[in-house]
Structures are given as C-alpha cells and as structure tokens.
Image (spheres, coloured by chain):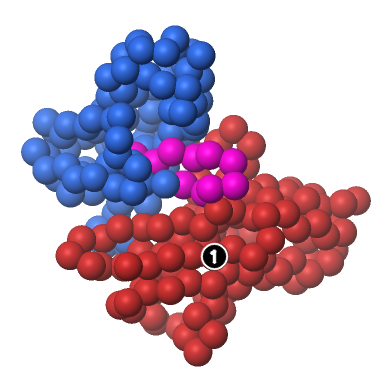
C-alpha cells in the first residue's frame, strides 16, 4: 500500500521568494511520484514526475523536485515565486500492486504576496 | 485536442435523486478513473477501469456505480444521492507510455 503526506495545508510566500512545498510518501514497491497543480475551478495539471531516471526532476513553470529515497521525500521547489504560481498543489504516488493506483496528498494551497 | 471531457460542470440534486456524471476521452487510453475532491482531503479514488468491460472499486466506492462499455466513455452513476456526496468530481485517463493522468475540468455537485 502507498500513502502521501503533504506538510502544511497552506503556504504563503512573497513574490520573488523561494517556494518549498513538502511531500513525504510511503510505498511497498518502487513508486512513481508526481506533482500536480490546480488553478481555481480547473482540473489538475501535471507539473512534473519522477520515474527513477534521475533524482532531480525539472517541471514546467520553473518548478523542480528532488527524490530522496532515504528520507522518502519528494519536495517541490521554485527559486523565485511569481503571482501566477498561486494555486493548490498536490503530491501523488503511483505504484503497481497488481494494478496501478494513484494516491493523492491532501494538497497545499500556495499564496503569493506582492 | 479535447482530452478528457466531463459533463455537466455544475449540478444540484435533491436527496434521493439519481443522476449520471459523464466522462469521455479521445486519447484511446485504457485506464480511466473517477475521483472526488473534498476540502483538506485531496482526491480520493471512487472507481477505476483498466479497459472496456473491466471496472473495480477505489477507496470510496459506496453510493456510486460505474460501467465501461467503450474505451472512450466512463460514466459515474449516483443511484440515490445523499448530502455526503456533495463534492467536486474529477474524471481522469492515464497514458500507459508516460504513466501520466489527464484530468477533466470537474463536475461540482451539490446534494440538498
């Protein structure tokens, strides 16, 4: 079985500041890890994914995430926040346990202050 | 370039009414799924399908039925709506090559 924990339901940063959204996972088999973004009244869009090719994954809009197996973490970062980054972010884990199932974290809402 | 299309976008039901949420995808994906999104709980898997004629339960299947007669369509049925089913519902299909899920825009359902 797999699970995902996102630390902090709300994160607030100033425009231009570092964005750090935390995600820890557990999985009994090697996982695929994802970050999705949801803008108001829209569905989820993929930001980036980890599939074991490289531990540092670069995504769209300047976001990246680092897979750390020893810490079972997959934190999302962006060096400089922009107002347009304000959204809700979801970490997700997919693992094959007789079939592919994806488990989502509870989400972290990012606020960006001018 | 439609992707995953959900209808309706909004729906208000009375307790006990039934309805079907429609989901269609044009990417020829075998794997499709339904999630519900509630504040502070992320997305929870209701039902999923790995191909036409094959469906299975997710985390929160009670009160919902699904069927998959074609690759393109995966409707979600509420047989007797309850206020606890007030939520935003998302349909998704998965690309097998890239293992990425593509989401519809969602259906916002209120049960009074």
Name the tint of chain A in the rendering: red
Q: Which residue is mark 1?
A: A5
Kindly identify which chain the residue marked by label 1 belongs to. A
Question: In the rendered image, which quarter is residue B72 located in?
Answer: top left
Q: Which residues are magenta?
A: B34-43
On the picture, is A13 further left or further right than A110?
right
- Residue A34 falls inside the magenta stretch: no
Looking at the picture, does residue B71 appear above or below residue A112?
A: above
The image shows residue B4 at horizontal and vertical percentages of 36, 36
Query: Residue at 30% of width from left, 35% of height from top?
Result: B62
Q: Pick the residue in front: A58 or A27.
A: A27
The image shows residue B110 at horizontal and vertical percentages of 51, 20
Count of marks placed on residues: 1
Q: Quadrant of the N terminus of chain B?
A: top left
- What secondary structure is marked by label 1? strand
Q: Is the residue marked by circle 1 packed among few (<14), some (14-19), or many (20+) residues within 10 Å? A: some
The image shows residue A75 at horizontal and vertical percentages of 60, 72
Query: Residue at 52% of width from left, 49% of height from top?
Result: B42
The image shows residue A11 at horizontal and vertical percentages of 75, 58
Q: Pick the residue in front: B69 or A46.
A: B69
Query: Residue at 43% of width from left, 65% of height from top?
Result: A3
On the question of residue A62 being in view, the answer is: no
- Residue B38 falls inside the magenta stretch: yes
Question: In the rendered image, which quarter is residue B104 located in?
Answer: top left
On the question of residue B31 being in view, the answer is: yes
Query: Residue at 78% of width from left, 51% of height from top?
Result: A111
Name the tint of chain B in the rendering: blue
Looking at the picture, does residue B32 appear above or below residue B98?
A: above
Looking at the picture, does residue B84 appear above or below residue A88?
A: above
């Amino acid at each position: 079985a797999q699970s995902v924990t996102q630390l902090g339901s709300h994160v607030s940063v100033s425009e231009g500041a570092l964005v750090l959204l935390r995600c820890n996972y557990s999985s009994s088999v090697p996982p695929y890890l994802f970050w999705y973004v949801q803008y108001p009244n829209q569905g989820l869009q993929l930001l980036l994914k980890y599939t074991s090719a490289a531990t540092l994954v670069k995504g769209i809009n300047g976001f990246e995430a680092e897979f750390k197996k020893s810490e079972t973490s997959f934190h999302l970062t962006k060096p400089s926040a922009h107002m347009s980054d304000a959204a809700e972010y979801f970490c997700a884990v997919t693992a094959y346990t007789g079939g592919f199932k994806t488990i989502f974290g509870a989400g972290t809402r990012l606020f960006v202050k001018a | 370039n439609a992707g995953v299309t959900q209808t309706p976008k909004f729906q208000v039901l009375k307790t006990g009414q039934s309805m079907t949420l429609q989901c269609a995808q044009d990417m020829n994906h075998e794997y499709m799924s339904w999630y519900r999104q509630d504040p502070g709980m992320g997305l929870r898997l209701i039902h999923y399908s790995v191909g036409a004629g094959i469906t299975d339960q997710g985390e929160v299947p009670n009160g919902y039925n699904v069927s998959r007669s074609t690759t393109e369509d995966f409707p979600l049925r509420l047989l007797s709506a309850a206020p606890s089913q007030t939520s935003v519902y998302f349909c998704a299909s998965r690309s097998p090559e890239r293992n990425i899920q593509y989401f519809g825009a969602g259906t916002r359902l209120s049960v009074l």
